[in-house]
Image (tube, grey):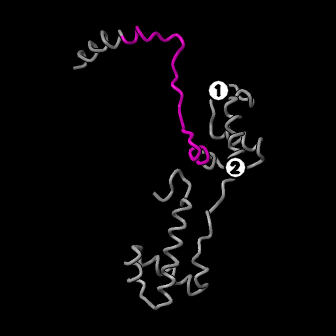
Amino acid sequence: MRYPQGGGLTAERQQFREELRLKAAERFARGETSSVIAKDLRVSVRSVQRWRQMWDEGGPRALRSQGPASLPRLSEKQFAQLEAELANGPAAHGWEDQRWTLSRVKTVIGRRFHLTYTIQGVRKLLVRNGWSCQVPARRAIERDDESVAGWIKEVWPCAEDSRR
């Protein structure tokens, strides 16, 4: 998968792709055709054509990896601090109920680290670090599980039969 957990290529995969491009550059210098290079390197002809154009414009240096598309805005240390803030609960940050929403996490990040994230960016940040979206089960405090189980066994079958 190219984007595991929304994170882009791994460092190993980036290096592998760079090595492919540099192998193609050596073959460009020898005058080989794009289709032959693509077949041998097991990539698309269009990719080889793009690499050749970059090579024509800037030489082998143009085919080197430019690193990750973007660096994480929160460091590992800052994310650990964010997790500690989230563990304190929403009430510690001024909200009345005990539910974390993406917009609330975004607000905490803004207040604590002076960074602005989009709602989608907050979701990606949390998922990338092992968090998941969960909806709490809403059950009445007065609920009696034994009487519910009895109703399901005794009353519900009669109600199902009467519909037929």
Q: Is residue 81 left or right of residue 65?
A: right
137 in magenta:
yes
Callout in the foreground (2, 1): 2
Q: Residue at x 53, y 84 (%)?
A: 53
Residue furthest out toward the left: 164
Report the span colored magenta. Answer: 124-149
Say which amino acid is labelled 1: Gln
Task: Assign a secondary structure to mark 2.
Answer: loop
Position above or below: 143 against 78: above
18 in magenta:
no
Quarter location, residue 106 = top right
Quarter location, residue 45 = bottom left
Residue 80's x, y, as percent? 68, 40
User: Which residue is tagged 1?
Assistant: 98
Q: Classify 10 Å Cα crowding around label 2: few (below 14), some (14-19), many (20 and above).
A: some
Position above or below: 38 against 103: below
Task: Assign a secondary structure to mark 1.
Answer: loop
User: Which residue is tagged 2?
Assistant: 74
Q: Classify 10 Å Cα crowding around label 1: few (below 14), some (14-19), many (20 and above).
A: few
Say which amino acid is labelled 2: Leu
Position above or below: 32 against 104: below
